[in-house]
């Protein structure tokens, strides 16, 4: 590996991936492992923004008894818990980090301000975006696509608990087909579970490449250095 092929990236981490095999809560080993990967990129000058999901604490859409708007706001708060945990892990290894949230909570994080976020990145700080877009009815996938466009990131690194995009769940179906390269329209038309259709359309409109891979320090680094793993959507 000679040098990174990207200068500014947005790393989207699903909440489920943070919980490991437990399926709930935060696995400290996984969070620390992610932090080491981010630090390695930060040390070589790659500007890293992060959007975290909240599925390890809350999946509002599975709660049919709660008002959808309320459920979505609860999910946003779950993402802030993950953002704070990741920030703490990064700062413990000497990486300057800022959390910005789509919902104001000034005692624990900065409110999202685009110019300030860009300035943080330019100064070598990792910026973690919590609380999604700050609006109900929009997923953290859409938040990742939106923030990537606003930060002018070159690529979205979509770190999941599966190693690529498949036509069906590979953990359930042994004959699931793995894709190495897809177009945005293929993702939308085939209803593949890469990102939701709103997020995919936003990436398509802004020509933001999506790279899907299994969450690990090694994979995060390899993707930024140009190694072909997982699935590319462009």
Image (spheres, rainbow, N blue to C red):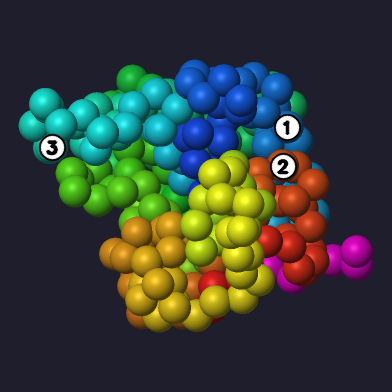
Q: Is residue 8 left or right of residue 222?
A: left
Q: For numbered disc 2, what is the local secondary structure?
A: loop
Q: Which residue is mark 1?
A: 33
Q: Are marks 1 and 2 in contact (CB under 8 Å)?
A: yes
Magenta highlight: main SS: loop
> Is 207 situated above or below 228?
below
The earlier-in-sequence mark between 3 and 2 is 3
Can you give x and y, in whole percent of width and height, for residue 129 in the image?
43, 43
7 sits to left or right of 13 = right
Label 2 neighbour load within 10 Å: few <14, some 14-19, many 20+: many
Residue 183 in the image: state x and y as whole percent: 50, 80
Could you say whether the residue bearing mark 3 is in a helix, strand or loop?
A: helix
- Is 133 displayed left or right of 210 in the figure? left
Instruction: Give the x, y percent position of residue 71.
Output: 19, 31
The residue that mark 2 highlights is 216
* Contact? badges 1 and 3 (CB < 8 Å): no
The mark closer to the camera, 1 or 3, is 3
Which residue sits at x=29%, y=64%? 198
For label 1, the crowd category at 10 Å Cα-Cα, with few meaning under 14, some 14 to 19 and many 20 or more, is some
Given this view, does label 1 or label 2 mark the residue nearer the observer? 2
Instruction: Kindly identify the residue that appears in the image at 65 percent across and 44 percent down.
Output: 215
Q: Residue furthest right?
A: 2
Residue 117 appears in the picture as rendered: yes
Mark 1: secondary structure: helix
- Ranked by sequence position, the earlier of labels 1 and 2 is 1
Front-most of 160 and 138?
A: 160
Q: Please tell me which residue is depicted at 34% across the width and 27% down the height of the picture.
A: 58
Residue at the disc numbered 3: 68
Real-space CA distance between mark 1 and mark 2, rounded to the nearest whole angstrom = 7 Å
């Amino acid at each position: 590996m000679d040098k990174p092929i990207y200068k500014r990236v947005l790393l989207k981490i699903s909440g489920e991936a943070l919980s490991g095999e437990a399926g709930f809560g935060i696995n400290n080993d996984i969070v620390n492992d992610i932090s080491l990967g981010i630090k390695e990129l930060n040390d070589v000058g790659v500007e890293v923004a992060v959007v975290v999901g909240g599925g390890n604490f809350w999946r509002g859409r599975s709660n049919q008894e709660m008002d959808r708007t309320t459920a979505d706001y609860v999910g946003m708060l779950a993402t802030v818990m993950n953002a704070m945990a990741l920030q703490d892990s990064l700062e413990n290894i000497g990486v300057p980090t800022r959390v910005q949230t789509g919902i104001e909570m000034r005692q624990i994080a900065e409110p999202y301000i685009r110019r300030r976020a860009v300035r943080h990145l330019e100064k070598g700080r990792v910026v973690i975006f919590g609380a999604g877009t700050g609006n109900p009815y929009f997923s953290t996938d859409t938040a990742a696509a939106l923030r990537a466009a606003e930060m002018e990131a070159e690529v979205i690194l979509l770190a999941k608990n599966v190693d690529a995009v498949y036509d069906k769940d590979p953990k359930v179906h042994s004959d699931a087909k793995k894709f190495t390269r897809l177009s945005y329209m293929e993702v939308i038309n085939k209803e593949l579970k890469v990102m939701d259709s709103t997020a995919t359309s936003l990436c398509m409109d802004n020509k933001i490449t999506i790279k899907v891979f299994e969450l690990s320090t090694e994979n995060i680094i390899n993707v930024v250095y140009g190694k072909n793993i997982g699935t590319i959507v462009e």
